Image: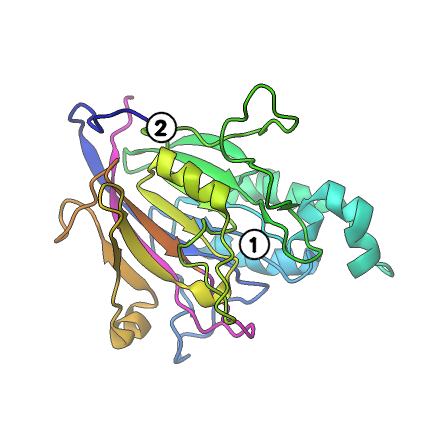
């Protein structure tokens, strides 16, 4: 980690993100609904979905949320899987998932993958990411680099699980038996981290007061220091907070419930035009965007975040 978190002054462009997670096959409600998660989803430059698109990875479930994303007012829609999206974890499905969940009617895994990576997805602006880093040039002139991962620590018998003592997010020592396949890059390479699970100690407390985020992911995000880290997985952890890496102080956002319903989202402006612009390398905004509450009711709101991104070189 560099001792001085300074980068040369660069031109930036204000970019709006709409963030959702853990929709679990629930489309937005009608416009007359009293809840924030209703049609239409808030317009944005980039829509991010942090996984758990479905309940058990049925093709009809994917099709329903696919249509929601396709209709959304965003040029780019970035999607990752979650532990419930079992048919997107081919190894898990073949070894365990099919027998546990789909014994009588197995899914066609190629058909599922083709939905998210085929021509129809491209035409809709949908990009499905597996674990790793991807760079985008946005239509507003910004450059966006995302690190994505659907993996989370062991969570019952679901997809994309790893043992808690395994570190897949930081570079592995040469002598380590396990070598992280896609470790998270260090600052300042990543603008947005999109993971299904939360880092340890950040918006990850369950209804039983258990802190269940990943310790290794927490170390990795501290090394990476993205502008934004969004996730879901822990439904009751819904919320947003800004962390200052120097003094370790967190600022939780107080969201006006009336505005949240009216705007169909929790809105935070951390761009230069806002009252408290985010300082890249010194601060990170964390968002748990789980739409479902702990008993699987779509009571939580999407998040809308304004951030400044570097202008693309070309």
Against 215, residue 209 (above or below) is: below
Residue 99 in sight from this viewpoint: yes
Badge 2 crowding class, 10 Å Cα cut-off, few under 14, some 14 to 19, many 20 or more, is some
Where is residue 17? Give x, y as percent: 34, 49
**Is residue 309 magenta-colored?**
yes
**Residue placed under numbered mark 1 in the picture:** 66
Q: Residues within 10 Å of mark 1 (few under 14, many from 20)?
A: many
Report the front residue among 260 and 232.
Answer: 232
Tell me the CA gap for discs 1 and 2.
Answer: 30 Å
Name which residue lies at 47% across and 31% down. 133
Q: Nearer the viewer, mark 1 or mark 2?
A: 2
Q: Quick one: SS at disc 2?
A: loop
Q: Residue furthest front?
A: 175
Against 79, is 232 above or below? Answer: below
Mark closest to the chain's N terminus, 1 or 2: 1
Relative vertical location of residue 298 with respect to residue 138 in this rendering, above or below: below
| Residue 275 percent across, percent down from the top left | 12, 53
- Whether residue 138 can be seen here: no
Contact (CB < 8 A) between labels 1 and 2? Answer: no
Q: Which residues are magenta?
A: 290-313
Whether residue 226 is in magenta: the answer is no
> Which quadrant of the view contains residue 10?
top left
Q: Main secondary structure of the magenta part?
A: loop
Q: Going by the image, does 11 lie left or right of 295? A: left
Percent coordinates x, y for residue 204 in the rendering: 45, 59
Q: Which residue is mark 2?
A: 189
């Amino acid at each position: 980690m560099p001792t001085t978190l300074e980068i040369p002054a660069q031109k930036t462009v204000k970019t709006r993100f709409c963030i959702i997670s853990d929709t679990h096959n629930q489309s937005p409600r009608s416009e007359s609904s009293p809840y924030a998660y209703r049609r239409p989803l808030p317009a944005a430059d980039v829509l991010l979905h942090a996984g758990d698109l479905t309940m058990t990875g049925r093709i009809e479930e994917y099709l329903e949320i696919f249509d929601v994303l396709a209709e959304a007012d965003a040029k780019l829609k970035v999607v990752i899987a979650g532990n419930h999206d079992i048919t997107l974890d081919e190894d898990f499905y073949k070894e365990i998932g099919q027998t546990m969940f789909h014994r009588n009617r197995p899914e066609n895994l190629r058909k599922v993958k083709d939905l998210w990576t085929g021509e129809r997805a491209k035409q809709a602006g949908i990009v499905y990411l597996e674990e790793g880093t991807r760079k985008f040039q946005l239509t507003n002139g910004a450059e966006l680099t995302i690190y994505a991962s659907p993996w989370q620590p062991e969570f019952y018998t679901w997809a994309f699980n790893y043992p808690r003592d395994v570190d897949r997010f930081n570079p592995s020592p040469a002598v380590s038996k396990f070598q992280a396949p896609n470790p998270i890059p260090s600052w300042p390479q990543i603008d947005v981290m999109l993971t299904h699970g939360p880092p340890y100690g950040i918006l990850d407390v369950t209804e039983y007061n258990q802190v269940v985020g990943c310790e290794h992911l927490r170390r990795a995000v501290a090394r990476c220091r993205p502008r934004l880290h969004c996730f879901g997985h822990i439904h009751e952890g819904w919320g947003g907070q800004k962390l200052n890496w120097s003094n370790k102080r967190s600022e939780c956002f107080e969201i006006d419930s009336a505005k949240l319903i009216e705007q169909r989202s929790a809105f935070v402006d951390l761009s230069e035009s806002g009252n408290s612009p985010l300082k890249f390398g010194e601060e990170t905004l964390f968002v748990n965007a789980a739409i479902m509450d702990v008993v699987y009711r779509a009571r939580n709101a999407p998040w809308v975040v304004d951030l400044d991104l570097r202008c693309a070189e070309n």
